[in-house]
Image (cartoon, helix red, strand yellow):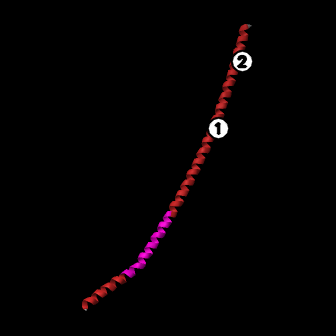
Amino acid sequence: MTEKKNAHTSVRSANAHAKATTTKAKETTARAKDTAGEAETTAKTAAASAATTAAHTAHVAADKAQVAAEKAVATGRTVAAEAPKKAAAAAGSAWMALKARKV
């Protein structure tokens, strides 16, 4: 009878140990799921932040390019407006030099 009692006690002990191990495994799985969820949230936040930063950088670069283009156009207009004046001044100087030579 004592052997039967010990066998039942061993089975009960094994069952209790199996239940405890199963509970620990479930807890570990739950923690792993939580960690994976947090990692996913962090990754999404980082991706959104990177996209926002890239968009902002592109916008700033476009603004700088527009300002540079406007300056180039303004410089071109100035050069184009001054070219006839310089040509007329050079022609006037040449004419004065020619007149002075004749005199």
* Category of crowding for the residue at label 2, using alpha-carbon neighbours closer than 10 angstroms: few (below 14), some (14–19), many (at least 20): few
Q: In front here: 64 or 93? A: 93
Q: Residue at x 50, y 63 (%)?
A: 64
Majority secondary structure in the magenta region: helix
Q: Residue at x 66, y 34 (%)?
A: 30
Q: Secondary structure at mark 1?
A: helix
Q: Residue at x 60, y 44 (%)?
A: 42
Q: Residue furthest right?
A: 1
Residue 33, quarter of the rendered image: top right
Q: Position of residue 23 (x, y in %)?
A: 68, 28
Which span is picked out in magenta?
Answer: 64-86
Q: Amino acid at mark 2?
A: Arg
Question: For the residues carrying marks 1 and 2, which lies nearer the camera in this image?
Answer: 1
What label does residue 83 carry, if any?
Answer: none
Up/down of 73 relative to 64, above or below: below
Q: CA distance from mark 1 to mark 2?
A: 33 Å
**Magenta stretch holds residue 52:** no
Up/down of 53 relative to 19, above or below: below
Q: In front here: 25 or 45? A: 45
Q: Is residue 77 left or right of residue 89?
A: right
Q: Is residue 79 left or right of residue 7?
A: left
* Category of crowding for the residue at label 1, using alpha-carbon neighbours closer than 10 angstroms: few (below 14), some (14–19), many (at least 20): few
What label does residue 34 carry, if any?
Answer: 1
**Magenta stretch holds residue 79:** yes
Q: Secondary structure at mark 2?
A: helix
What label does residue 12 carry, if any?
Answer: 2
Earlier along the polypeptide chain: callout 1 or callout 2? 2
Up/down of 6 relative to 79, above or below: above
